[in-house]
Amino acid sequence: MSTNNSNNPLHGITLEMIIKELHSSYGWEKLGVKLNVNCFLKDPSINSCLKFFRKTPWARTKLEKIYLDFKSKS
């Protein structure tokens, strides 16, 4: 029995880990430029971002792409 998890570059990485790593590298303002969403622009916090991205699949997909691009450059 094989799984597709080994092919998933985000396997084992939580949404919270993604947000924290991007925030520590870019900051809220730069993240707001990369992805124009209110949770980055208006009173940003980890918790507000988690809530938003868990409820908004299109935004989470874009955030994951930003993260994968970031990781490929480092």
Image (tube, rainbow, N blue to C red):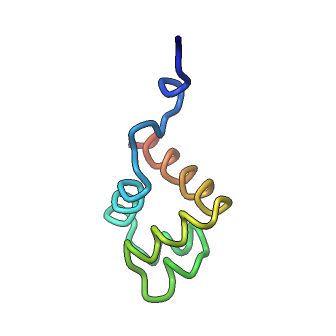
| Residue sitting nearer the eye, 19 or 54 | 54
Residue 35, compared with residue 3, is above or below; it is: below
Return the x and y of residue 22 as percentages of the image width and height.
Answer: 40, 60
Which quarter of the rendering shows the C terminus? top left
Return the x and y of residue 47 as percentages of the image width and height.
Answer: 39, 74
Return the x and y of residue 3 as percentages of the image width and height.
Answer: 53, 21
Rendered residue at 54%/65% (across/down): 53
Residue 18, compared with residue 29, is above or below; it is: above
Return the x and y of residue 69 as percentages of the image width and height.
Answer: 52, 46
Rendered residue at 38%/59% (across/down): 16
Furthest toward the right, the residue is 58
Furthest toward the top, the residue is 1
Furthest toward the bottom, the residue is 43
Rendered residue at 56%/73% (across/down): 33
In the image: residue 47, left or right of residue 2: left
Rendered residue at 63%/66% (across/down): 56
Residue 48, compared with residue 56, is above or below; it is: below
Residue 48, compared with residue 1, is above or below; it is: below
| Residue sitting nearer the eye, 29 or 56 | 56
Furthest toward the left, the residue is 24
- Count of all numbered marks drawn on residues in the image: 0
